Amino acid sequence: MNEVTKKIKETAFKVREKINKKKKPEISIPIRALSNVNYDPKKGFFELKGGKKVRALTVNTIKSFAQTLKMMSLSKSIVESDDMATKREAYYVSKNWGEAGFKEQPESDAVMDDIEAMFMVNREQLGFLPEEKGGDIAGQLIVIDKDPTTGKEIKIDCTKFGSGAYSIPSSVEELKFETNAKFILAIETAGMFQRLVKHNYWKKTNSILISMGGVPTRACRRFIRRLADDKKIPVYVFTDGDPYGYMSIYRTLKVGSGNAAHINKFFCVPQARFLGVTPQDIADYKLPTHPLKDVDKKKIKDVIKNDPFVKQHKEWEKALQQMQKIGQRVEQQALAAHGLNHVIEKYLPDKLKDTKKFLP
Amino acid sequence: MQIKLSQDTEELNHALEQAKKQREISISEFFTKNRHLLGFDNPLKSLSTTIKEGVDNALDACEEANILPNVKVEIKQTTQDRFIVIIEDNGPGIVKQQIPKIFGKLLYGSKFHKLSQSRGQQGIGISAAALYSQLTTGKPIKIKSKIGKNKPAYYYELHLDTAKNEPEITKEVEISWEKEHGIRVEMEMEAKYQRGKRSVSEYIKYTAIANPHATLSLVEPDGTKQEYPRATTQLPVKPKEIKPHPDGIELGILINMLKSTDARTLQSFLTNEFSRVGSGTSKKICEGANLYPNSRPSRIAKQEADNLLNAMRKQKFIAPPTDCLSPISEELLKKSLKKEFDAEFYTAVTRPASVYRGNPFRIEAAIAYGGALEKDKPAEIIRFANRVPLQYQQAACSITKSVIRTKWKQYGLHQSNGNIPVGPMVITVHIASAWVPFTSESKEAIAHYPEIIKEIKLAVQECGRHLGKYLRRQHKEKDAAQKQSYLEKYVPIIGEALKEILPDTKPTIVSKNLKEVLEKSRK
């Protein structure tokens, strides 16, 4: 029997036992927040501490309790029939649950997250898929996938997409790779990715370019992790120079997030290093800047005080303090101020000469 | 020299000119010019003041004669801005020779000279209305009166001579009237008719609430008829006339009393004309004022009266008697509110009598809550003084102040700081007193005496506590019902989900057990 269906049955059994002994059943779920994670650089990702919330079945919680059980039942039937459902589809299935149906999708997503955390698995294992796009790839890489109907292997050559790109699928667990690339460059914005693809940057440097399009999706993170582990290639990250680029994008890619702490083990890229744009680059490359917004200032204060990742890495603390002091942020595209291809001809080559200087 | 002479003549001429103008101003003349002091500031208010005065008089007269009042008010429109007002009662009527004076002379009445709880106090009201009618239309006031079954009825038409403050009879005839006794007054005046807040119809409705023993009716200009039948056939206990209490007396009044008393000695004056003054205290007062107890009251000079007053102030007196007050009663207040407001909860409180500045008073409060009353609006506050609704100057009144100062949140209502509580609620407060302290002559707001505010707050708070108790019970019942419906909805779904995951589940047993567990728990 599948691991997940076994866990679902065990939980349901315990609930039923309690009820039939005329006691209130309980479900306990790990607390998913930054306050409940540990960070050990040796392990390389945010790990849950022991904090759990126990949800007892009472009159007030009966609705979400019923919804959780129904969602577990749906997951079990999907996994048993070797099918899948997107998060949106699961939301529509709930419309058949009468009073327990969800009004909006965020409600069903939250219940799904709870079940994930409860069983310490990821939602793909529960049979649920996200709608989100995984990210785009161009460069020296061949992805080996399977034909969905015949099951035969297909080789996808990521050098053959011209000015386009290969899309990371939502489930990456079964993929295999062939490559001799020297590094992976994960890029925040689609605009910068386009510029590098257009000028065949990957060919010149024998690399793999990945467009994350903001905060990387789980599939994107898992893809980079598997590829980097498999082929032992370093991962460099290139984002805007602001707290969002540093913490929401880079930190999430590298060590995971508080909210998904139960699955960070799979969805982290501990070998990732930060290329830029750093606060120091602003001075070094004379880049035009914008003043920090109030939310940026708040975020810097908050992460210096509370984020276990920043607390572990003094280099990051210093960089953030430096940004706090100059009160300015900088975009990737600001490099264009010195000529459109300044980034290819000067900035990246300069940086790549000394990767030891990259932020951890 | 030439110049000086002409100056002298000019001054002389001036003085003569002035002397021609200087003469006694009659009361009627004074009020002609200052009619706003009596509530005749504008056409809208003049109409409501007229009706108020007429109805107050009718109710006072009926009660005094032990008659259950039937009062009819009718308003007819004659031109764009002119209306005829008719007020008819079944009271004892007025004897023939008094009729012209009561309706055609200002400050003529029976109530000013005695101290007891009554609606009107100065004897100005109805004749001021007649004066206003004459001023704006030139028409006479028309009166019908009959004092008994086998007595003739009389019909009068009167004008007021404003210079002399005397009535001028323009018509006087004996007529037949099918009524056993009563009065019918008719006058035409410049006015404006409106519905809603502070309207005549609101006044009649409120009056019905404070006077459950009266049957009232109103015919509006468009012919709409409103009827307020009485809620009880029991007349209110007649308030006793009382003598002034020494604590509240002022020098002017004391001097007047000294002049007009029948008592021969100062000592008997004090014991006879005041309440709560015995012969012992009376002697002590005389001693304190350095006056002989057997001196003639009318001979007391102004300076001596001052000493007398100071001596009185130094004495301690028992609180005044309270049988001069006639409250509406908790039961009848509730009954009245039930009749006029479609609510779901009613409560009323009558406080024991208390005293401010030597004047006894008694506070009553009542609340109607919920039902068809308007939600999400400030509570409606209905204020009564001696059973008369107060419709103007709500914000200046100590009743409103006391309601605002009460903390309504603790009774489960919404209230923002310094405001009237919000909710489907009517708050009624009645002050009964032989002398109600108004903030001004037009008798629209109660003055802020700490003793009065304290009593109002106590009454309102007690009503609030009753309401709070009721609301908490309501809440509990609603919660229980909600809990039950929640269980009905979701328990079967849990049974069904368990059956889907574990096919050997018996959903009915699970549901039954789960329901039992949850019903026991209070959360």
Image (spheres, rainbow, N blue to C red):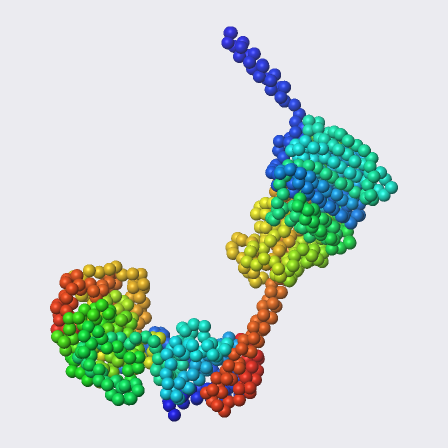
- Residue nearest the observer in this picture, A310 or A83: A83
- Residue nearest the observer in this picture, A140 or A50: A140
- Residue nearest the observer in this picture, B253 or B160: B160
Residue at 52% x, 10% y is B4
Against B302, residue A67 (above or below) is below
Residue at 20% x, 81% y is A157
Q: Residue B320 in the image: x percent, y percent?
A: 71, 47
User: Where on the picture, by quarter, is residue B335?
Assistant: bottom right
Is residue A350 something that shows in the picture?
yes
Q: How many marks?
A: 0
Q: Residue B356 in the image: x percent, y percent?
A: 65, 47
Say whether residue B488 is left or right of residue A296. right
Say whether residue A147 is left or right of residue A17. left
Q: Residue A224 in the image: x percent, y percent?
A: 24, 79
Against A327, residue A58 (above or below) is below
Is residue B266 something that shows in the picture?
no
Say whether residue A76 is left or right of residue A174. right
Residue at the farthest front position:
A149
Against A286, residue A82 (above or below) is below
Residue at 75% x, 43% y is B88
Residue at 78% x, 53% y is B234
Residue at the farthest top position:
B1
User: Where on the picture, by quarter, is residue B27?
Assistant: top right
Say whether residue B465 is left or right of residue B68. left
Q: Residue B413 in the image: x percent, y percent?
A: 56, 60
Against A148, residue A165 (above or below) is above
